[in-house]
Image (spheres, grey):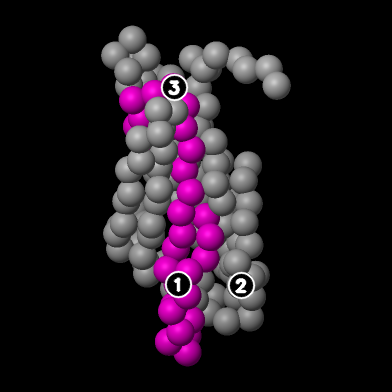
Amino acid sequence: MYTEITREIEVTVEPIYLEDQSAPDEGHFVWAYRVRIQNRGGETVQLLNRYWRITDAQGRIQEVRGAGVVGEQPVLHPGEAFEYTSGTPLRTSSGFMVGSYEMESESGESFDIAIPAFSLDSPHDEALLH
């Protein structure tokens, strides 16, 4: 699990390699990731937009921007949490993701919160000793 807290909004991510949707011999590796966004602050906020930077093991970068997450723009009152699952494919057996959510406070202030960088590792990676 990977966790980051920005302005009392906690984002936790758990990546899961999907063996049944991957085809390693064809250079196709798929991960799901579960995200939990919890409002630990005292003000109601709404998630407006998302930004992801996905990097594979060869350094290829894909950027994804869009409204909300999984078709929703959740409102989080103090103490509330929102969870969703999404996924991403890569052409390599490992990589990583990092990003941010654009939030809006009930007073109309727009601000970004960090999504922690997390590793996408498959059982097809070679073990590296350091």
Establish if 6 lies above or below 99.
Answer: below
Neighbor class of circle 2 (other Cα within 10 Å; few <14, some 14-19, many 20+) is few
- Does the stretch in magenta take in 64? no
Tell me if label 1 and label 2 are in contact, CB under 8 Å.
Answer: yes
- In the picture of the structure, the residue carrying the numbered disc 2 is 7
Front-lying residue, 83 or 98: 98
Instruction: Give residue 13's position: percent from left, percent from top.
Output: 55, 46
**Real-space Cα separation, disc 3 to disc 1, in angstroms:** 32 Å
Q: Residue at x 63, y 62 (%)?
A: 5
- Does the stretch in magenta take in 91? yes
Tell me if label 3 and label 1 are in contact, CB under 8 Å.
Answer: no
Q: Mark 2 or 3 closer to N-term?
A: 2
- In the picture of the structure, the residue carrying the numbered disc 1 is 103
**Real-space Cα separation, disc 2 to disc 3, in angstroms:** 34 Å
Front-lying residue, 68 or 121: 121
The residue tagged with tag 3: helix, strand or loop? loop
Instruction: Give residue 46's position: percent from left, percent from top.
Output: 44, 73
* Quadrant of the snapshot with the C terminus: top right
Q: Mark 1 or 2 closer to N-term?
A: 2
Q: Which residues are magenta?
A: 87-115
Q: Callout 3, which amino acid?
A: Ser
- Depth check, mark 3 against mark 1: the one in front is 3
Q: Quadrant of residue 48?
A: bottom left
Q: Residue at x 32, y 43 (%)?
A: 62
Q: Quadrant of residue 26?
A: top left
**In the image, farthest residue toward the right:** 130
* 49 relative to 121 in the view: left or right: left
> Which disc is residue 93 wearing?
3
The residue tagged with tag 2: helix, strand or loop? loop
Q: Main secondary structure of the magenta part?
A: strand
Q: Callout 2, which amino acid?
A: Arg
